[in-house]
Image: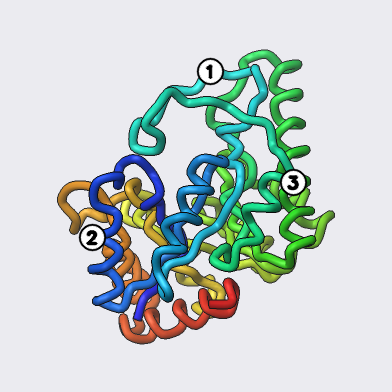
Amino acid sequence: MLIDTHSHLNFSAFKEDWKKIIQKCLKEDIWIINVGTKYETSKRAVEIAKEFEKGVYCAVGLHPIHLETGLVKIKDDIQEIEFKRKEEDFDYQKYKKLAQNEKVVAIGEIGLDYYYRPKTKKKLKEFKEKQKEVLLKQIELAKELNLPIIFHCRFSHPDLIDILKKVKVKKGVIHCFTGTLKEAKEYLKMGLFLGFNGIIFKRDLKEVIEKTPLDKILIETDCPYLTPPQIEGKNTPFGVKYVAQKIAQIKGISFEEVAEITTKNARELFNL
Protein backbone atom coordinates (compact mmCIF):
# COMPACT_ATOMS: atom_id res chain seq x y z
CA MET A 1 0.00 0.00 0.00
CA LEU A 2 1.09 3.60 -0.74
CA ILE A 3 -0.34 6.95 0.30
CA ASP A 4 0.07 10.04 -1.87
CA THR A 5 0.01 12.61 0.92
CA HIS A 6 -0.12 15.61 -1.40
CA SER A 7 -2.16 15.45 -4.59
CA HIS A 8 -4.20 18.00 -6.54
CA LEU A 9 -6.87 15.99 -8.33
CA ASN A 10 -9.10 18.87 -7.23
CA PHE A 11 -7.40 21.10 -9.83
CA SER A 12 -8.78 21.86 -13.28
CA ALA A 13 -6.03 19.72 -14.89
CA PHE A 14 -8.10 16.71 -13.77
CA LYS A 15 -11.61 18.02 -14.35
CA GLU A 16 -12.33 15.32 -16.95
CA ASP A 17 -10.62 12.28 -15.43
CA TRP A 18 -10.26 12.67 -11.64
CA LYS A 19 -12.84 9.99 -10.84
CA LYS A 20 -11.34 7.42 -13.21
CA ILE A 21 -7.86 8.09 -11.79
CA ILE A 22 -9.05 7.70 -8.20
CA GLN A 23 -10.93 4.47 -8.92
CA LYS A 24 -7.81 3.01 -10.54
CA CYS A 25 -5.62 4.17 -7.63
CA LEU A 26 -7.90 2.55 -5.06
CA LYS A 27 -7.87 -0.72 -7.00
CA GLU A 28 -4.06 -0.64 -6.84
CA ASP A 29 -4.08 0.21 -3.11
CA ILE A 30 -2.95 3.82 -3.47
CA TRP A 31 -4.68 6.24 -1.11
CA ILE A 32 -4.86 9.96 -1.78
CA ILE A 33 -4.96 13.24 0.13
CA ASN A 34 -6.10 16.09 -2.16
CA VAL A 35 -4.81 19.41 -0.91
CA GLY A 36 -6.51 22.79 -1.22
CA THR A 37 -4.72 26.01 -2.17
CA LYS A 38 -7.58 28.50 -1.81
CA TYR A 39 -11.25 28.29 -0.85
CA GLU A 40 -12.36 27.14 -4.31
CA THR A 41 -9.88 24.24 -4.54
CA SER A 42 -10.29 23.38 -0.85
CA LYS A 43 -14.06 23.05 -1.29
CA ARG A 44 -13.51 20.93 -4.39
CA ALA A 45 -11.15 18.65 -2.46
CA VAL A 46 -13.84 18.10 0.18
CA GLU A 47 -16.49 17.37 -2.46
CA ILE A 48 -14.27 14.75 -4.12
CA ALA A 49 -13.37 13.07 -0.82
CA LYS A 50 -17.03 12.81 0.17
CA GLU A 51 -17.70 10.63 -2.89
CA PHE A 52 -15.51 7.83 -1.52
CA GLU A 53 -16.05 5.86 1.65
CA LYS A 54 -12.37 5.08 2.16
CA GLY A 55 -8.96 5.94 0.73
CA VAL A 56 -9.60 9.54 -0.39
CA TYR A 57 -9.14 12.45 2.01
CA CYS A 58 -8.45 16.16 1.84
CA ALA A 59 -6.83 19.23 3.35
CA VAL A 60 -8.09 22.82 3.26
CA GLY A 61 -6.13 26.03 3.39
CA LEU A 62 -5.04 29.25 1.71
CA HIS A 63 -1.70 28.93 -0.10
CA PRO A 64 0.45 32.09 0.28
CA ILE A 65 0.55 32.60 -3.48
CA HIS A 66 -3.22 33.16 -3.45
CA LEU A 67 -3.17 35.67 -0.61
CA GLU A 68 -4.51 39.14 -1.39
CA THR A 69 -1.60 41.54 -0.87
CA GLY A 70 -1.94 43.94 -3.81
CA LEU A 71 1.87 43.90 -4.02
CA VAL A 72 2.67 41.33 -6.71
CA LYS A 73 1.27 40.22 -10.03
CA ILE A 74 1.14 36.44 -10.51
CA LYS A 75 0.55 34.56 -13.74
CA ASP A 76 -2.56 32.40 -14.05
CA ASP A 77 -2.02 28.65 -13.75
CA ILE A 78 -4.58 26.94 -15.98
CA GLN A 79 -3.72 23.55 -14.48
CA GLU A 80 -4.98 24.80 -11.11
CA ILE A 81 -8.03 26.93 -11.80
CA GLU A 82 -10.13 27.28 -14.92
CA PHE A 83 -10.74 30.99 -14.65
CA LYS A 84 -8.59 34.02 -13.99
CA ARG A 85 -6.69 33.84 -10.73
CA LYS A 86 -8.38 35.79 -7.96
CA GLU A 87 -6.51 36.53 -4.77
CA GLU A 88 -8.40 36.28 -1.50
CA ASP A 89 -8.24 37.30 2.13
CA PHE A 90 -8.26 34.57 4.74
CA ASP A 91 -11.73 34.16 6.22
CA TYR A 92 -11.18 32.22 9.46
CA GLN A 93 -14.80 31.22 10.04
CA LYS A 94 -15.38 30.21 6.42
CA TYR A 95 -12.36 27.90 6.40
CA LYS A 96 -13.20 26.61 9.88
CA LYS A 97 -16.64 25.51 8.74
CA LEU A 98 -15.18 23.73 5.70
CA ALA A 99 -12.43 22.10 7.77
CA GLN A 100 -14.95 20.53 10.14
CA ASN A 101 -16.00 18.02 7.50
CA GLU A 102 -15.02 14.50 8.60
CA LYS A 103 -13.00 13.96 5.41
CA VAL A 104 -10.63 16.85 6.20
CA VAL A 105 -7.44 15.44 7.72
CA ALA A 106 -5.22 18.55 7.72
CA ILE A 107 -4.96 22.30 7.26
CA GLY A 108 -2.93 23.00 4.16
CA GLU A 109 -1.28 23.82 2.12
CA ILE A 110 -0.25 26.94 3.99
CA GLY A 111 3.04 28.67 4.58
CA LEU A 112 5.41 31.19 3.03
CA ASP A 113 6.37 31.76 -0.59
CA TYR A 114 8.84 34.47 -1.62
CA TYR A 115 9.29 33.35 -5.24
CA TYR A 116 7.06 36.10 -6.65
CA ARG A 117 7.88 39.17 -4.62
CA PRO A 118 7.94 42.98 -4.79
CA LYS A 119 11.18 44.68 -5.80
CA THR A 120 11.34 47.50 -3.25
CA LYS A 121 12.47 46.87 0.35
CA LYS A 122 9.43 48.57 1.82
CA LYS A 123 6.94 46.56 -0.24
CA LEU A 124 8.90 43.33 0.32
CA LYS A 125 8.71 43.81 4.07
CA GLU A 126 4.97 44.46 3.90
CA PHE A 127 4.54 41.42 1.61
CA LYS A 128 6.37 39.09 4.01
CA GLU A 129 4.54 40.40 7.06
CA LYS A 130 1.16 39.83 5.39
CA GLN A 131 2.07 36.22 4.59
CA LYS A 132 3.30 35.61 8.15
CA GLU A 133 0.15 37.12 9.62
CA VAL A 134 -2.14 34.84 7.60
CA LEU A 135 0.07 31.82 8.26
CA LEU A 136 -0.28 32.39 12.01
CA LYS A 137 -4.07 32.59 11.70
CA GLN A 138 -4.16 29.27 9.86
CA ILE A 139 -1.85 27.66 12.43
CA GLU A 140 -4.31 28.87 15.07
CA LEU A 141 -7.15 27.22 13.13
CA ALA A 142 -5.25 23.93 12.95
CA LYS A 143 -4.64 24.02 16.68
CA GLU A 144 -8.29 24.82 17.42
CA LEU A 145 -9.45 21.84 15.32
CA ASN A 146 -6.57 19.61 16.45
CA LEU A 147 -5.47 18.97 12.86
CA PRO A 148 -1.94 18.52 11.49
CA ILE A 149 -0.56 21.07 9.04
CA ILE A 150 0.78 20.71 5.51
CA PHE A 151 3.36 23.47 5.07
CA HIS A 152 4.38 25.02 1.76
CA CYS A 153 7.77 26.75 1.85
CA ARG A 154 9.58 28.29 -1.11
CA PHE A 155 12.62 30.56 -0.72
CA SER A 156 11.54 31.17 2.88
CA HIS A 157 12.86 28.40 5.16
CA PRO A 158 14.63 30.70 7.67
CA ASP A 159 11.42 32.67 8.29
CA LEU A 160 9.26 29.53 8.54
CA ILE A 161 11.69 27.89 10.98
CA ASP A 162 11.73 31.04 13.10
CA ILE A 163 7.90 31.10 13.25
CA LEU A 164 7.57 27.39 14.03
CA LYS A 165 10.06 27.62 16.87
CA LYS A 166 7.88 30.28 18.46
CA VAL A 167 4.43 28.76 17.93
CA LYS A 168 5.52 25.16 18.57
CA VAL A 169 3.58 23.19 15.97
CA LYS A 170 3.82 19.51 16.90
CA LYS A 171 1.98 17.82 14.03
CA GLY A 172 2.80 18.57 10.43
CA VAL A 173 4.85 18.04 7.29
CA ILE A 174 7.09 20.29 5.22
CA HIS A 175 5.66 19.46 1.80
CA CYS A 176 8.02 19.20 -1.19
CA PHE A 177 11.11 19.73 0.94
CA THR A 178 13.90 21.43 -1.01
CA GLY A 179 15.88 23.03 1.80
CA THR A 180 19.36 22.32 3.13
CA LEU A 181 20.39 19.49 5.45
CA LYS A 182 20.72 22.04 8.26
CA GLU A 183 17.14 23.23 7.67
CA ALA A 184 15.89 19.65 7.48
CA LYS A 185 17.45 18.95 10.89
CA GLU A 186 15.68 22.00 12.35
CA TYR A 187 12.29 20.72 11.21
CA LEU A 188 13.04 17.19 12.39
CA LYS A 189 14.05 18.54 15.80
CA MET A 190 10.56 20.04 16.05
CA GLY A 191 9.03 16.62 15.35
CA LEU A 192 7.82 17.49 11.85
CA PHE A 193 7.86 15.20 8.82
CA LEU A 194 9.53 15.95 5.49
CA GLY A 195 7.56 15.31 2.29
CA PHE A 196 9.38 14.21 -0.87
CA ASN A 197 8.03 14.04 -4.42
CA GLY A 198 9.24 14.11 -8.02
CA ILE A 199 11.50 17.08 -7.25
CA ILE A 200 14.03 14.50 -5.98
CA PHE A 201 14.68 13.51 -9.60
CA LYS A 202 15.56 17.12 -10.46
CA ARG A 203 17.38 18.48 -7.39
CA ASP A 204 20.17 16.95 -5.37
CA LEU A 205 18.48 15.93 -2.12
CA LYS A 206 20.45 12.69 -1.71
CA GLU A 207 22.17 13.68 1.55
CA VAL A 208 18.96 15.03 3.07
CA ILE A 209 17.11 11.79 2.26
CA GLU A 210 20.00 9.65 3.50
CA LYS A 211 20.08 11.45 6.83
CA THR A 212 16.33 11.80 7.39
CA PRO A 213 15.00 8.83 9.40
CA LEU A 214 12.49 6.81 7.38
CA ASP A 215 9.95 7.21 10.17
CA LYS A 216 9.97 10.99 9.50
CA ILE A 217 9.41 10.77 5.72
CA LEU A 218 6.16 11.11 3.76
CA ILE A 219 5.86 10.47 0.04
CA GLU A 220 3.74 12.57 -2.30
CA THR A 221 3.34 13.62 -5.93
CA ASP A 222 2.08 17.24 -5.95
CA CYS A 223 0.40 16.14 -9.18
CA PRO A 224 -0.10 17.44 -11.83
CA TYR A 225 3.31 19.01 -11.14
CA LEU A 226 6.83 17.60 -10.58
CA THR A 227 6.39 14.59 -12.82
CA PRO A 228 8.92 11.74 -12.32
CA PRO A 229 10.90 10.98 -15.50
CA GLN A 230 9.29 7.52 -15.73
CA ILE A 231 5.90 9.10 -16.53
CA GLU A 232 4.86 10.43 -19.93
CA GLY A 233 2.21 13.14 -19.80
CA LYS A 234 0.82 14.70 -16.63
CA ASN A 235 1.69 13.41 -13.20
CA THR A 236 -0.94 11.50 -11.16
CA PRO A 237 -0.93 9.76 -7.74
CA PHE A 238 0.56 6.70 -9.48
CA GLY A 239 3.82 8.66 -9.55
CA VAL A 240 4.19 8.11 -5.82
CA LYS A 241 5.60 4.62 -6.44
CA TYR A 242 8.56 6.09 -8.35
CA VAL A 243 9.25 8.46 -5.46
CA ALA A 244 9.23 5.49 -3.08
CA GLN A 245 11.57 3.54 -5.39
CA LYS A 246 14.03 6.45 -5.53
CA ILE A 247 14.05 6.84 -1.74
CA ALA A 248 14.63 3.09 -1.36
CA GLN A 249 17.55 3.31 -3.81
CA ILE A 250 19.13 6.27 -1.98
CA LYS A 251 18.77 4.63 1.43
CA GLY A 252 19.84 1.19 0.22
CA ILE A 253 16.68 -0.49 1.51
CA SER A 254 13.76 -2.28 -0.11
CA PHE A 255 10.81 -0.62 -1.81
CA GLU A 256 8.55 -2.66 0.48
CA GLU A 257 10.13 -1.13 3.59
CA VAL A 258 9.70 2.40 2.25
CA ALA A 259 6.07 1.66 1.35
CA GLU A 260 5.32 0.14 4.75
CA ILE A 261 6.93 2.83 6.91
CA THR A 262 5.79 5.87 4.92
CA THR A 263 2.23 4.49 4.89
CA LYS A 264 2.43 4.03 8.67
CA ASN A 265 3.73 7.60 9.01
CA ALA A 266 0.88 9.03 6.92
CA ARG A 267 -1.78 7.04 8.74
CA GLU A 268 -0.51 8.20 12.13
CA LEU A 269 -0.01 11.87 11.21
CA PHE A 270 -3.34 12.28 9.43
CA ASN A 271 -5.28 9.82 11.61
CA LEU A 272 -6.38 7.74 8.62
Q: Quadrant of residue 135?
A: top right
Judged by depth in the image, the label closer to the viewer, 2 or 1, is: 2
**Badge 1, how many Cα within 10 Å: few under 14, some, many 20+?**
few
Relative placement, left or right, of 190 versus 249 is: right
Q: Residue at x 64, y 64 (%)?
A: 172
Sequence-wise, which precedes: disc 3 or disc 1?
1
Relative placement, left or right, of 64 versus 54 is: right
Q: Amino acid at mark 3?
A: Gln
Residue bearing mark 3: 93
Q: Secondary structure at mark 2?
A: helix
Q: Residue at x 55, y 51 (%)?
A: 179
Residue bearing mark 2: 20
Q: Amino acid at mark 2?
A: Lys
The disc at residue 73 is 1
Could you say which is closer to the camera, residue 65 or residue 16? 16
Image coordinates for residue 95, horizontal then vertical, percent: 66, 48
Image coordinates for residue 37, horizontal then vertical, percent: 53, 43
Q: Residue at x 32, y 48 (%)?
A: 224
